[in-house]
Amino acid sequence: MMKIALLVAMLMAPPAVAQGIFQTYDSDQLRRGLEVYTDTCSACHGLKHVPLRSLGDPDGPALDAAAIAAIGTPTDHFPPSALPEAPDLSVMARARSNPDHIRALLQGYTGEEREDHGAYLYGNTEFAGGWIAMPPTGLDAAQSEDVAAFLAWAADPNMAARKRSGFTAVAYLLVLAVLLALTTRSVWRRQPR
Amino acid sequence: MEPYRPKSAAARWLQSRLPLPGIIHHLFAARTPRNLNWMWVWGIILVFCLGLQIVTGAVLAFHYTPQTELAFASIQRIVRNVNGGALLQSLHANGASLFFIAIYFHIFRSIYYGSHKPPREVTWLIGMTMYLVLMTVAFMGYVLPWGSMGVGAATVVTGMFGTIPWVGDALQAWVLGGPSVGNATLNRFAVLHYLLPMVALGLMALHIWSVHVSGNSNPDGVEPRQDPEGNARDTLPFWPYFVLKDLLALVLVLVIFFAVATFGPDTFAHPENFVEAGGPITDAAPEWYFLPFYAILRSITPDLWPVQALHWISGGLLDAAFLGVLALFASVLVLMFLPWLDRSPVRSARYRPVFRVAALLLAADFVMLGWCGAGSGEGPWGLIGTLYWFGFFLVILPVLSRRERTRALPETIGRA
């Protein structure tokens, strides 16, 4: 019964879930995103939890040692936010329920502007409340997508490795389940009556 | 069950000094009803969960810092810098969800098949005490990463103590170790999050011991015959039959568990918990496993006439907030009294047609309350769910115990 239910559940999994399971990061895109981050975002925002060393991760931007050394000491982290009111972006991509939040926010500016107690607020359809203190960045659609991918990696740099562990674990457990099912069946068939 | 005879000299040596080999022998040789179905596998999954949480938790504690300025960063260090840290953290966080899924199936199996009835009330009471301990542990674990959702939940839950008349404010400050959720709170939560699972471990040992004194309940709710021939027809030894069956169930559950923990580790998490606490608390919601009880808490609103009446009679002492907290605690504690509320001599719902429907409705009610707890809290469904919850335990069960026309029980398990 349980095995049938499991099989049905696997077959009924929506394509989005299946896509999510196999999805990994694209190192070229992450490197482009890193460039956008360095040129634009890092003027105000920080990535204080992200070690520079991790930029060399083959699952991530896969920079070589010289490229990392050009940014800073590998054992250091990215600097924290330069502006105290700009939130740190280390885990921002996991802190919003919409996985497309960062890209949508960067592209969500309406062009409206208003002053509120001496501070400027900018109309943004993705931001809760519709008004955000961050001025428009001027990033185009491709740049927004790249930097969003980079920040997704920064928030969950172990995704690819974790998924590999997952495939191994699930595969071994399925083999174990089949062996146990066969053993259980043969033992129960010989039960004393 | 035949008496234990040590087979090796080493076992004989130990048995005469500490009868540990005998205890282990009896655990595996225990005569177990043949007819146990797949709802009897959740116990082994719960033993696994406690082990998993203790082992992964101990390793996480090597690297975690219970200090408000450092806690959030220390989790990020575990995930980014500790070998295997991301997997460990994901297994521990998702392990709590697996724990509660198994707990709810295990408790519902007891209610549905009457496992709590004589002579197994003590097993039930130990189990429910363990459930209370584990709820406390899970809640504290939710606060430790110092994310805004966990700290918001800590503020709301400890605020419940503040609603108690007269002593509330002093009690709340005593629980928190200060006027608000702060470093003192985080420290004691970290200590208790580590200490209380050891209490749960002791309770689990007592729980299993008591099961071995009274024997397993079973889906037909009739006791196995005690004469040697009848007993052999009604039962099988725990090893190898049920050990293998339980392990198979455990492995199948683990397939799903590992898939969730590695492919979608945030499936059961609140995104807001990835925001470091410190900003204004805009939102507070409990983890999914507390949502049904959260819905009961929120269903007691000031516009209900009994609430207004109690408020007026008590001269303003009892308000909706305090009555909601009472309803919340009562909704959990009423489970403790189950063996004395359901007095029907027939155990299993298989032979109780009306109870069967009422119990399945209780499961549906629990799911609906969870759905209400996740939503805005508006609409009548939370209150309807709360009324059915208390109605089931306090009205339906006592009435059914006397009035229900039950079906004829099988004479033995073998004939069922």
Image (cartoon, coloured by chain):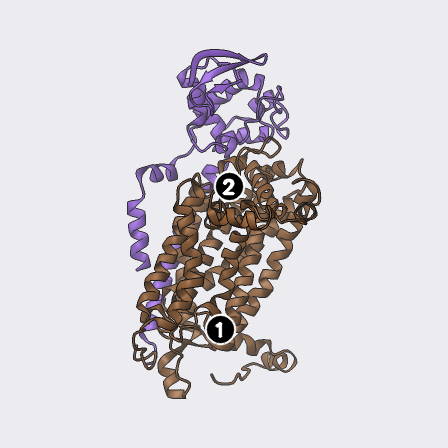
Q: Closer to the camera, B167 or B233?
A: B167
Residues indicated by labels 2 and 1 sit on the same polypeptide chain: yes
Q: Closer to the camera, B317 or A25?
A: B317
Tell me, by letter, which chain the rendering colours brown: B
Measuring from the top left, give residue B81's x and y in whole percent: 59, 38
Measuring from the top left, give residue B318's x and y in whole percent: 58, 49
Residue at (56, 43) in percent of width and height: B85
Determine contact: label 2, label 1, CB under 8 Å: no
Q: CA distance from mark 2 to mark 1?
A: 36 Å
Measuring from the top left, give residue A98's x and y in whole percent: 42, 31
Secondary element under disc 2, as helix, strand or loop, is loop
Q: Amino acid at mark 2?
A: Ala
> Which residue, given by chain and number where applicable, does mark 2 sit on?
B285
> Which residue, given by chain and number where applicable, does mark 1 sit on?
B120
Q: Is residue A153 above or below residue B287?
A: above
Secondary element under disc 1, as helix, strand or loop, is loop
Instruction: Tell which subunit mark 1 falls on.
Output: B
Tell me, by letter, which chain the rendering colours purple: A
